[in-house]
Image: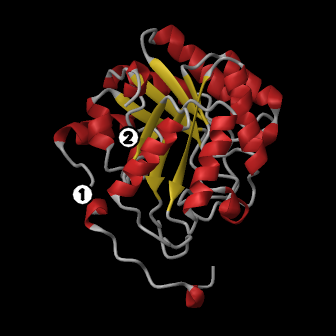
Amino acid sequence: MNPKALPPLLRKPPWLKVRPPYDDACRRIRSTLSGLKLHTVCQEAACPNMAECFACGTATFLILGNICTRNCLYCNVAHGRPQPPDEQEISRLIGAVKQMRLQYVVLTSVTRDDLPDGGAGVFANAIRRLRVEIPGCKIEVLIPDFQGNPDALARVIGAAPDVINHNMETAKPLFRELRPQGNYRLSLELLSRVAAAGQISKSGFMVGFGEQKEDILRLMDDLAAVSCARLTIGQYQQPTRRHWPVAKYYSPDEFSEFKEIAYAKGFQCVESGPLVRSSYHAARANTGPT
């Protein structure tokens, strides 16, 4: 993106000016994760909901390294050539879940197009080992598209996590530009396969890229058509000046409207708000609609 062509930055509205959590509990958790050489998306993104989720016994772990093979225009994760998977990573992950006494674990990863199965085997192994080591812990996975490989997806489905999430991230008119290495149709097909297998399917997207309201409603319709059960909608916030600019900051009232519309379209659980992220209130969704 040409810096000279960048539009002026929009002023953040007051509802997005939230200080990241730095209380004692978060410091202890950071220390635990650092000692085990693990990363959480909560930390990496300085998520404003981190303290709330940790207090509820939920955390989102980033597995398969921190270098992505793709370069989406909204994402601040480093891209390039990743290292081979760390064989001890899952053992350290289990250790962290035990130390943190987590009741709900979300596993996600960078996209690993360099691996034959896109990392599906690592996801499946992590799920199975967590089931053995911590039987009462609920497990949600937030997976990449595995380049449409049905066998890779089947490995994850076969490990039987409680929820399988795959984020669409953006509406169809902007999808190709924002996610040049992704495919809108393949992502919907993945979610359709998850639902057809009897698993709880989930997806999420951000608003504020420059989409129109009808684009958002069309995306909801497309997700409902593949029996996606759970949905998260949040505000896009530009990580750096090199990333896609924010075209609009949606108000809390607009997010409330999206939530009502999504429920009317048949979604079972919906989280919609300026600060909502993929795993926000993930554990609470298992007790019924929010």
Residue 199 visible, this angle: yes
Q: Mark 2 points at which residue?
A: 34
Q: Which of marks 2 and 1 is in front?
A: 1
Per the image, the residue denoted by label 1 is: 19
Residue at (77% x, 29% y) in the render = 152
At horizontal 71% and vertical 19% (from top left) the residue drawn is 197
Residue type pointed to by label 2: Ser
Query: Pointer 1: residues within 10 angstroms few (<14), some, or many (20+)?
Result: few
Choose the circle earlier in sequence order: 2 or 1. 1
Image quadrant in which you'd find residue 129: top right
- In the image, residue 92 above or below residue 50: above
Label 2: which secondary element: helix
The quarter of the image holding the N terminus is: bottom right
How would you rate the neighbour count of disc 2 (Cα within 10 Å): few for under 14, some for 14-19, many for 20 or more? few
The kind of residue on which mark 1 rests is: Arg
Question: As drawn, is 10 to the left or to the right of 123?
Answer: left
- Dividing the picture into quadrants, the one containing residue 249 is bottom left
Residue 169 horizontal/vertical position (percent) = 59, 51
